Image: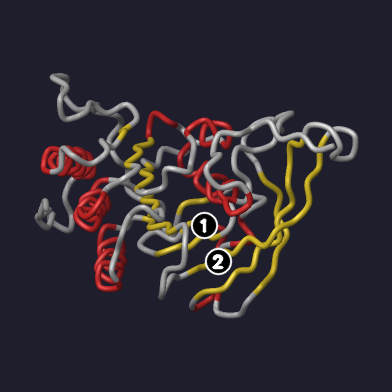
Amino acid sequence: MTVVPEAPARSDHAARHARALAALRSAERAAPARPRPTPVGVPGPGDDAPPAAGPPRTAPPRGGRAVHPDLAPLLPGGVLPTGGVLAVQGSTSLLLGLLAAPSRAGAWTVLVGAPAVGLLAAADAGIDLARTVVVPAPGPDAPAVLAALLDGMDVVVVGPQAPLADADRRRLAARARQREAVLVATGRWAGAHVTLDARGGTWTGVDAGAGWLHRRTLRVLRTGRGASARPVEIDVEVPLGGEPPLTAPADTVAQDRPGRPDDRHLRVA
């Protein structure tokens, strides 16, 4: 198991980003039998090329990272809370829609233990793949890998294939707060500042939805702490990236179509 040392609380953002990627590659070398993580735009442990430099990690915006205006009502202040934990359940399209605007604004994003999230779907949602890292199966080193990535990434997504104990979750939440990163869980997370639970909805498309589907209205239940303590149900539309596509989003409600993350051509009779 790779132990990631504590970084200084006020270290340079670019140095923190490089250190997180180095720790990730060290974790890969320590467990060669596990499926190799697939960083986008970052050399693997067997490559001779130096790590991709990328732009320096910028200081997080005061208060949080703004999301698409149509999704802003879901979040207190309309932003992803820097230093906080957000849980998004039931819809991968909603998850990607929330990540798109911060990604386009320059935030570095990593998907850990979330192999069902397809990169084609992410690109369609508007996420900048040049600033995206994917670790599909971190294995038993998940807590150490996540801790390292919180040091250098702006938004860290934790999927179901990242096994964590309750104590790990508490430590990671504290680290996100210290590093002013956004920690996003795709399942339940005790103590999350905001929990968004997508509860179905309706499709729209060509011929009143009888042809190619391209948009879905979701009913989302918001719960949480503080400003989100009172439960609220809000209707939102996804996907939101760019021009509305003439095909269905990649994986709109994850539970509806498990194991088919890149099936973007859904047609109904």
Judging from the image, the colouring scheme is: secondary structure
Kind of residue at badge 1: Val
Q: Position of residue 256 (x, y in %)?
A: 63, 51
- Residue at 56% across, 34% down: 262
Q: Which mark is residue 123?
A: none
Q: Characterize the local packing of mark 1: few (<14), some (14-19) or many (20 or more) Cα atoms within 10 angstroms.
A: many
In-image side of 242 versus 63 (left or right):
right
Q: Position of residue 177 (x, y in %)?
A: 30, 64
Q: From this view, report whether residue 185 is shown above or below residue 257.
A: below
Residue 139 horizontal/vertical position (percent): 25, 51
Q: Quadrant of the C terminus?
A: top right
Q: Secondary structure at mark 1?
A: strand
Location of mark 2 (residue): 76
Please indicate whether residue 1 sits to the left or right of residue 68 in the image. Answer: left
Mark 2 element type: helix
Q: Mark 1 touching mark 2, by CB under 8 A?
A: yes
- Circle 1 sits on which residue? 79
- Cα gap from disc 1 to disc 2, whole angstroms: 7 Å
Q: Residues within 10 Å of mark 2 (few under 14, many from 20)?
A: some
Amino acid type of the residue that numbered disc 2 sits on in the rendered structure: Pro
Whether residue 192 sits left or right of residue 181 in the image: it is right
- Residue 45 is situated, as x and y percent measured from the top left of the image, at 16, 30
Which sits in the foreground, 16 or 119? 119
